[in-house]
Amino acid sequence: MRVPILKQGDYLIAPIQSALSDADFLRMQNELVDQVGKLRSRGVIVDVTALDVMDSFATRTLRSTALMTRLRGAETVIVGVQPEVAFSMVQLGLTLRMEDVETALDLDEGLAFLDRQTKG
Amino acid sequence: MVTQPEEWGARSVAALRRELVEHFTEKREELRQQWVEQMTAKGLLAGLTQTEIETESATIYDTCIGCLETGQYDRAQTYATTLAERGVLRGMTSEQIIGGMLTLRDVYGRSLFERYQKDMKRLSAALDIYEPVANKILSIIALAFIDEREKVVRQQQEAIREISTPVLQVRNRLLIMPIIGLIDAQRARQLTEQLLRSIRANRAKVVVIDITGVPTVDSKVANNLIQTVEASRLMGAVVIVTGLSAEVSQTLVTIGVDLSKLNTVGDLQGGIEAADRLLGYKVITTEQATEIR
Amino acid sequence: MADEMRVPISTDADIITARQKGRALAEWVGFSGSDLTIIASAISELARNIIEYAGHGEIIIRLAERGARRGIVIVARDDGPGIPDVALAMQDGYSTGKGLGLGLPGARRLMDEFEIVSEVGKGTTVTVGKWR
Ligand SMILES: Nc1ncnc2c1ncn2[C@@H]1O[C@H](COP(=O)(O)OP(=O)(O)OP(=O)(O)O)[C@@H](O)[C@H]1O
Ligand SMILES: [Mg+2]
């Protein structure tokens, strides 16, 4: 299932809509990094509300997406991590790997965060 | 039971079993009435309506005959479970249930005695068939009740825990969770799950966890707290921990707990102020407030 | 529902199938909330290791009963290269690939029971269980 990438002003939004295969994850990563460069976006929001599992692969991929877009001048925020998913990620030991990645409650909060970062 | 006499071989046991089933089916109304009367006399039916008594007693009666006939107990098992659910829910006691089943066992037994009293061999063979079935049913029902009781107790404990640690919304986007009492692994898990759900439900941005009321904070408790903080952060919320005394922090650091991940503030008041600053509220004294007005 | 489900694992899409089936069975057993996510995450880690290190294998998900307790048992098996040093592979952060090295130790933390049997050249079988 392909993740659409939406442009909203200076930002890119990737709303994940269902469980993603590893290949889909990597494609999303490539497209985001690519588009950030092309469009000179200042921020990226990856909405993971629809994910019912975030395993080590998903976490690793999201983190490297964030680091790669940052190198290209865009801050990435992960929004919508569900309570159960957060709980399970902590048990798995994945949180450490997310320490340098920004998170926000939902899309609105993610946008507000990016506005503060880029305009404030 | 001792060895079975020669004349009661497998075939005659099967025949006698059929005969018992027929007997109990024929006498269904009479025996069921006797059973209900005896239970009423013993006060075992307190709290049940007439319709309930009629339907439950008929179902139990027929289920028992079914077990006798087929030697299969899964229907009895299923029925016992629902009976237990309903019974426990309505506050029926184990005396009522087990007393009721013992009474039924007596009613069945007595009627066998009446029927076969002239033929002691046949009677003893009949009892050999009937008793194990009756005992098995009795134990199924008793176990179902014990299981159900335990389930209810567990649920109540969980509910009490949840009430005893409220997550309070003090203002928009700010939650406070005052923890009182010991924290073991299970409670830590329950607290974390409860907090994470509340963060989502209230769209919280800042959470103050106050542990003033936690008697001992050891490395386990601290690590659990760190996990709670990390999970909250994944959801986009910041956690401030208050009520961790300087001495305890010192000890924890000495034994190697990495407290750098905990955002700590001395007391609850200070924690709320810090939270307000994070949320962008300005904390002002009442005097200042009057001036502004 | 059957007491046991087998999911062949040979592409990354199979990982999703395996964890969805695991989740469904776990729900049927009576697990809820975080436990469902935890079980699905463990399946995800084990299935991905199969793809990554063995190429293909299978995930078996079964109902389990122990006295009055019900649970779920997941077996992840493959005929791949095996793990030379299991104790090392179980350490947080150890990876021979480009992973975080959290899959196996993480799955152990997530589940109530964990067992791994691996023989170089023969394959690897990881069995995990969770009880209600
Ligand atoms: N099924 C398997 N067959 C062969 N080797 C395996 C298998 N599963 C794990 N391993 C070995 O054990 C190591 C640790 O596995 P683990 O799942 O913990 O981490 P990872 O897969 O390297 O990274 P992560 O799972 O965090 O993405 C792997 O790097 C690999 O060498
Ligand atoms: Mg792995």
Image (cartoon, rainbow, N blue to C red):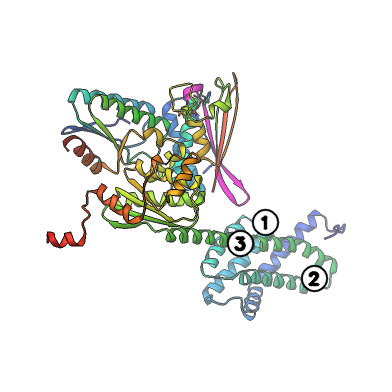
Few, some or many residues within 10 Å of mark 1 (<14, 14–19, 20+): few
Few, some or many residues within 10 Å of mark 2 (<14, 14–19, 20+): some
For the question of whether residue C124 can be seen, the reply is no
- The circle on residue B70 is 1
- Residue located beneath label 2 in the image: B116
**Residue at horizontal 46%, vertical 33%?**
C44
**Prevailing secondary structure of the magenta residues:** strand
- Which corner quadrant of the image does residue A33 belong to? top left
Mark 3 to mark 1: distance in Å? Answer: 26 Å
Which mark is nearer the camera, 3 or 1? 3
Secondary structure of the residue carrying numbered label 1: helix
- The circle on residue B146 is 3
Mark 2 to mark 1: distance in Å? Answer: 22 Å
Residue A77: image location, x then y, percent: 28, 36
For the record, the magenta segment spans C51-72
**Residue at horizontal 35%, vertical 55%?**
B268
List the single residue furthest toward the right: B6
Circles 2 and 1 on the same subunit: yes
Circles 3 and 1 on the same subunit: yes
Q: Quadrant of the N terminus of chain A?
A: top left
